[in-house]
């Protein structure tokens, strides 16, 4: 009997230990590990008040970090290097998992954690050479003396925090995914830089454009895809360049038809920024505003902070994983940025000696490519291998498979050795004292090209288009090119010829991802540019007389869509309303709608449905892999060419439809669909919510009542929108306001995980304080870092 | 009288075990608390029934108290989210779920200890 009971108790105990501590329970980590209140998820159920902490680390003097009531850290340090050490500790404490995932996702290392479900994603990232781009970015930290030291200090700060963690401290997602943090490095910082670079300048349409061109022919393609929108108001409204470079010539095109194997970055990654000269403001102070539009997610992409040095105050938002403040202001000036849509990614076919890609032609000679073997660690199974080729023309992502892009070279700006690093730029911005310092820092920034806005406390407002913008050897970069024996580009628009505006007569500078210049700019450029927000912004700025911080905030909240204002009247004019008496109230609503996308209205929901259906029926002959016609051109066709063949509907072989017929058909289809959807208002239809990085619903927000649309200044979409709103008023004193949709902590169990989301949705702002010292009544907790003995 | 003594003994053992489990879990790996319960079962328990009950109760009480404390301090923010993650279980039940899991571990540990101790008694 004793043997039996002992054996049973032993077996049960061993099973309990084995399955409870070492075996995953389906998607969950081992059950005891997870539910143990001392090491498991309960440890992330934080109190509201952050505990005091003390560290001894590699700082030259004592550093005090004082947290305010939103958990924004105010770092008081003797040197910038000490401050970024503290920043490393802070980023690690509040955002370590976000840093880990961002760096892994950037270069294709997710499968090491997530297993085979992310293997295809990793393979694509490896093929494209993103790890190599990160290595190049890391090498470029060396370009300026101080940058390397600052990055190293930051990395040391992160690792200091990681080393003192035990299992209980691991962020919740590490526990859920059942893995442990590993050391940080300057390469991992570069991987985070590369992640943002990819998001902002990987977008290219060469494959879709070539497929569409092959189907349509050049004449029709140029008709439907003009390079310039006649109504556009560019960022730099006068030709600020004396350059005399001649534009290029006819492209050599590859005739193809294939589907792009790549997920493109979010097409709505964009932003608004502007600066108003003090001559146009009520307080006689310059005003700068910036709201970068990115994918909305939790933990938030931004981490807010203030650095106080003996001679300098810097406030703004940082990227977890990267030292310094990226967007913000110091005690001399403010800066912000929006993305420049110039195309810096090209595909082309070199001349190969044979189908095994043994040699390619370069300047009339055969050269052998180098084989690149990338090993991908995959959790729970054997390592995977990806083989690419490296040529002097660029990288060949598909070298061995039977893929349609086999042998094609991919040339991407950030993947090319080019000195200059955004790290030099942002450190320079942080520590600069005037416009000259700002411009000196600017020149180091290469990728992703940005429209940097500037306003100081004196007389200066400016906007600079900054980045490495290619001058192509052949063609314009829109299509896959054939028989290339040289790189797609090897030169860039010279720094002195990059467009900029400084104190223009109009009294303001602005950008909203539209074209940088008028077509008279002597350098050819091509890319993805916004067509509505920029014009709205310029109109509103022209009407500001005088402007104030309050009116500038109102502009950031504007839910007005110029796309709707231009498209809807055309649709309404062509619609025979009498045929739809049943829907007279809906049509009346649309007729009287002021084109503001407020959440409680049905008209925005109805219009968006109608417009989408109209485009779908218009482009019914378009294949899934074709380039869609842009909205501005669709409006133009509707207005100027209602009899264009594009409006002919494939389903009716004998009847030739016009735009009027498609308007009728699309209204009928969309109103029926609207009924079937239960007649949602704009809030329900748009469904803006903020998703957790790992798409865990429980850690995401509910649908938010946030006005706006993709074409409004308040550019909110389902997963996308203003990721940081900042307004800074600079003169004899500095007043600043800001907010981002999230919270300072990346821990779903923190009071500060998503505490700002509702206020953000309601258009509120928080004052951004440059507290002079750590002894303020507003501070709730202090951390101290002292020199290691 | 015997009943009272038994109860007092049970409570004292429970308190001693609960304190041991709590501090071992805080200062060392929580896995060591299973070993403590095995040792208790082997060396100090006075019956199979008491071993099973005390193994269960000591971990259950400690884990329940601690999780309730953490949950209250956290205003139920995280337990609500974990509850949703686990299929919309009410967050307020999760301290009990955790305590039950711990209690089962405690029972199995002290039972094993008791059975092993029997070989030497």
Image (cartoon, rainbow, N blue to C red):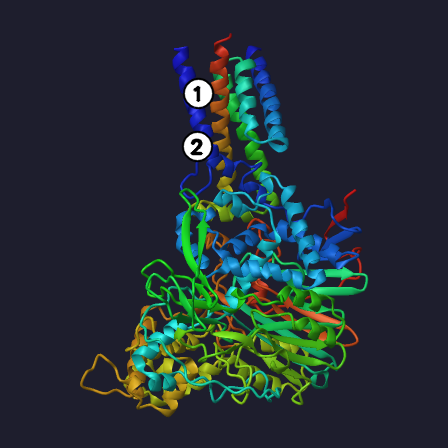
Disc 2 designates what residue? Answer: A19
Q: Which of the 4 image quadrants contains residue A665?
A: bottom left
The percent position of residue A432, horizontal first and vertical second, equals 74, 69
Left or right for A210, reference A80: left
Kindly identify the residue that appears in the image at 69 percent across and 46 percent down: A51
Which quadrant holds residue A678?
bottom left
- Figure check: A290 above or below A545: above
Whichever of labels 1 and 2 marks the residue nearer the N terminus, that label is 1
Residue that lies at the very extreme toward the top in this rendered image: B121
Horizontal side of A30 relative to A187 (left or right) equals: left
Q: Would residue A570 be found to the left or right of residue A310 on screen?
A: left
Tell me which chain the residue with mark 2 is part of: A
Kindly state the secondary structure of the residue where label 1 is placed. helix
Q: Judge whether residue A282 can be spotted in this image.
A: yes
State whether residue A190 is above or below residue B87. below
User: Who is closer to the viewer here, A774 or B91?
Assistant: A774
In what element is the residue under mark 2?
A: helix
Query: Most extreme residue toward the left, as rendered?
Result: A654
- Residue position marked by numbered label 1 in the rendering: A10
Q: Residue at x 61, y 86 (%)?
A: A241
Question: x and y percent of residue B66 in the render?
Answer: 59, 36
Measured Cα–Cα span from mark 1 to mark 2: 14 Å
Q: Residues within 10 Å of mark 2 (few under 14, many from 20)?
A: some
On screen, residue A766 above or below A275:
above
Q: Residue furthest front?
A: A365
Residue A376, compared with residue A313, is above or below; it is above
User: Which quadrant holds the N terminus of chain A?
Assistant: top left
Q: Is residue A300 visible?
A: no
Q: Are marks 1 and 2 on the same chain?
A: yes
The front one of A753 and A656 is A656
């Amino acid at each position: 009997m004793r043997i039996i009971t002992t054996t049973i108790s032993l077996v049960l105990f061993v099973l309990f230990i084995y399955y409870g501590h070492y075996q995953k329970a389906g998607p969950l980590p081992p059950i005891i590990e997870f539910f143990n209140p001392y090491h498991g998820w309960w440890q992330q159920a934080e109190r509201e008040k952050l505990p005091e902490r003390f560290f001894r680390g590699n700082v030259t003097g004592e550093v005090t970090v004082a947290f305010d009531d939103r958990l924004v850290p105010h770092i008081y340090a003797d040197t910038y290097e000490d401050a970024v050490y503290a920043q490393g500790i802070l980023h690690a404490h509040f955002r370590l998992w976000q840093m880990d995932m961002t760096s892994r996702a950037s270069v294709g290392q997710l499968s090491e954690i997530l297993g085979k479900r992310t293997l295809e994603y990793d393979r694509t990232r490896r093929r494209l050479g993103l790890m190599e781009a990160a290595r190049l970015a890391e090498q470029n930290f060396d370009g300026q003396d101080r940058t390397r030291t600052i990055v190293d200090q930051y990395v040391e700060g992160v690792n200091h925090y990681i080393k003192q963690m035990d299992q209980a401290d691991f962020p919740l997602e590490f526990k859920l995914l059942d893995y442990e943090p590993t050391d940080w490095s300057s390469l991992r910082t570069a991987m985070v830089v590369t992640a943002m670079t990819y998001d902002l300048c990987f977008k290219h349409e060469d494959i879709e454009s070539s497929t569409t061109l092959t189907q349509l022919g050049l004449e029709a393609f140029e008709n439907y895809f003009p390079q310039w929108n006649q109504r556009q108001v560019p960022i730099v409204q006068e030709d600020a360049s004396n350059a005399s470079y001649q534009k290029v010539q006819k492209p050599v095109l590859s005739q193809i038809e294939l589907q792009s194997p790549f997920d493109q970055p979010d097409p709505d990654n964009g932003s608004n920024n502007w600066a108003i000269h003090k001559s146009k403001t009520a307080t006689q102070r310059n005003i700068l505003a910036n709201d970068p539009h990115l994918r909305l997610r939790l933990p938030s992409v931004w981490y807010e902070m203030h650095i106080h040095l003996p001679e300098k105050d810097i406030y703004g938002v940082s990227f977890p994983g990267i030292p310094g403040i990226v967007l913000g202001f110091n005690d001399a000036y403010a800066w912000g940025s929006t993305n420049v849509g110039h195309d810096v990614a090209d595909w082309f076919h070199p001349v190969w000696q044979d189908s095994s890609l043994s040699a390619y032609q370069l300047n009339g000679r055969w050269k052998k490519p180098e084989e690149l073997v990338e090993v991908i660690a995959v959790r729970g199974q054997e390592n995977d291998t990806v083989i690419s080729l490296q040529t002097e023309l660029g990288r060949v992502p598909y070298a061995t498979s039977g893929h349609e892009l086999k042998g094609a070279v991919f040339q991407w700006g950030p993947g090319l050795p080019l000195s200059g690093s955004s790290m030099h730029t942002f450190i320079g911005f942080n520590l600069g004292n005037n416009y000259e310092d700002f411009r000196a820092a600017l020149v180091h920034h290469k990728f992703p090209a940005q429209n940097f806005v500037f306003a100081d406390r004196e007389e200066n407002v400016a906007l600079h288009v900054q980045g490495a913008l290619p001058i192509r050897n052949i063609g314009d970069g829109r299509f896959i090119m054939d028989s290339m024996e040289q790189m797609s580009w090897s030169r860039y628009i010279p720094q002195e010829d990059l467009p900029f505006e400084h104190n223009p007569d109009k009294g303001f500078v602005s950008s909203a991802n539209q074209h940088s210049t008028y077509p008279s700019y002597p350098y050819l450029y091509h890319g993805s540019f916004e067509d509505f927000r920029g014009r709205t912004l310029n109109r509103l700025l022209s009407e500001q007389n005088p402007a104030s911080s309050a009116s500038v905030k109102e502009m950031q909240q504007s839910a007005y869509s110029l796309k709707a204002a231009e498209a809807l009247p055309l649709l309404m004019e062509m619609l025979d309303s009498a045929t739809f008496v049943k829907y007279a109230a809906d049509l009346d609503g649309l007729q009287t709608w002021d084109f503001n996308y407020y959440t409680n209205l049905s008209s925005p929901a109805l219009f968006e449905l109608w417009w989408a259906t109209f485009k779908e029926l218009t482009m019914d002959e378009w294949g899934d892999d074709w380039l869609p016609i842009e909205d501005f051109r669709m409006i133009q066709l509707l207005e100027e060419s209602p009899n264009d063949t594009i409006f002919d509907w494939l389903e009716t072989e004998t009847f030739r439809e016009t735009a009027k017929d498609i308007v009728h058909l699309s209204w009928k289809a969309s109103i029926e669909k609207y009924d079937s959807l239960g007649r949602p208002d704009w809030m329900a239809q748009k469904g803006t919510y903020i998703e957790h990085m790992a798409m865990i619903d429980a850690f995401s927000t509910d649908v938010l009542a946030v006005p706006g649309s993709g074409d409004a200044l308040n550019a909110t979409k389902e997963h996308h929108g203003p990721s940081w709103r900042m307004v800074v008023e600079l003169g004899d004193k500095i007043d600043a306001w800001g907010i981002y949709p999230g919270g300072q902590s990346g821990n779903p169990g923190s009071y500060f995980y998503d505490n700002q989301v509702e206020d953000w949705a309601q258009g509120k702002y928080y004052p951004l304080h440059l507290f002079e010292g750590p002894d303020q009544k507003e501070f709730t907790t202090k951390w101290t870092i002292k020199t290691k003995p | 009288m015997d009943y009272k003594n038994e109860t007092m003994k049970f409570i004292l053992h429970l308190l001693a075990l609960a304190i041991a489990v709590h501090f071992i879990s805080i200062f060392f790996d929580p896995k060591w608390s299973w070993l403590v319960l095995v040792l208790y079962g082997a060396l100090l328990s006075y019956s199979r029934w008491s071993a099973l009950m005390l193994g269960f109760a000591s971990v259950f009480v400690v884990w329940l108290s601690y999780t309730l404390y953490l949950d209250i301090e956290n205003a139920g923010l995280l337990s609500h989210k974990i509850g949703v993650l686990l299929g919309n279980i009410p967050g307020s039940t999760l301290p009990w779920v955790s305590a039950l899991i711990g209690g089962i571990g405690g029972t199995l540990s002290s039972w094993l200890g008791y059975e092993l101790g029997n070989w030497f008694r």
